[in-house]
Amino acid sequence: MSAPTAAPATGTTTGPFTAAADLSRLVVRDLRRDLRLLDGLIVNTALPVMIMVLFVYVFGGAITTGSSGLDYVDFVVPAVLLMSGGYGASLTAVTISDDMTGGMIDRFRTLPISGWVVPAGHVVASVVRNLASSAIALGAALVLGFRPDATLAEWALVLALVTGYVLAMSALAAVWGLLVSSSQAAGAFSFVVLFLPYVSDGIVPAQTMPGVLSDFAYNQPLTPIIETMRALLLDLPMGSSGAVAAAWLTGTVVLCVPAAALLFRRRTSSR
């Protein structure tokens, strides 16, 4: 009798249908794990509502929207949608770091799956999970008085922008989680993602900020994304913000997705 053949390590090339099946299993695994974690449920359900209530009822009465003339709830909703989805997406860095340092990867290496499927599973699960968070934030906004004027096509574009942002942040978080050596260091990425909307045109008008901060707010990625969403939701002029937002999101995804796959392959091949 011949000796049994060992299963190939992670990194094996498989067919597209097999890889798709492996990816779906890993996505389901990540989503089930989130359902079992209390802090994950809080981040994805309660936090979007808390953020929306905080900005509309606590800060809203003290903040003016400048020359836009918008009610504050209408002004801030795009930023809160991105905050709700983006913060959860940033935690992808922690989940993938936990897998890398907790022994799970050693189990994956004994299976005949492509190496790119593991980080891709984290990213896809993050997109599903955090689109739900953004939807919860939108529901809270509608309850608090948000009244958009978007058509069905414009809603589709808003969904594409939010999906693109969550995908970009998830892929970037995966890269960060594969670069650092501990889940504590991976968690630092969430602070950056949560902080960026505050220094944009999303929470307060960028024109009210002092010179250096105003320049940064106008030229960072979130401002054109927020301005595009605001224009679509409230029937406002868009200008060039849509093209700039698409360029930022596309560039981030195109760079980070293959980078995550490459980093994963390098780390697992050296173990």
Image (cartoon, rainbow, N blue to C red):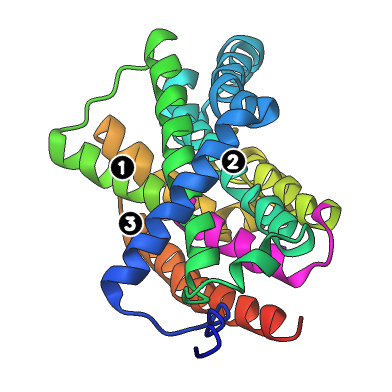
Disc number lying in front (3 or 1): 1
Q: Secondary structure at mark 1?
A: helix
Quadrant where the C terminus lies?
bottom right
**As rendered, which of 120 and 110 lies closer to the eye?**
110
**Residue at the disc numbered 1:** 158
Q: In which image quadrant can residue 28 be found?
A: top left
55 lies above or below 78: above
Q: Amino acid at mark 3?
A: Gly
Mark 2 neighbour class, 10 Å CA radius: few under 14, some 14 to 19, many 20 or more = many
Residue 242: assigned label: 3
Q: Residues within 10 Å of mark 1 (few under 14, many from 20)?
A: many
* C-alpha separation, residue under disc 3 versus residue under disc 2: 24 Å
The part of the image, by quadrant, that contains residue 97 is bottom right
Q: CA distance from mark 3 to mark 1?
A: 11 Å
The amino acid beneath tag 1 is: Val
The residue range painted magenta reads 166-183
Task: Name the side, left or right, on which 158 lies relative to 203.
Answer: left
Q: Considering the numbered disc 3 on the image, is that residue within a helix, a strand or a loop?
A: helix
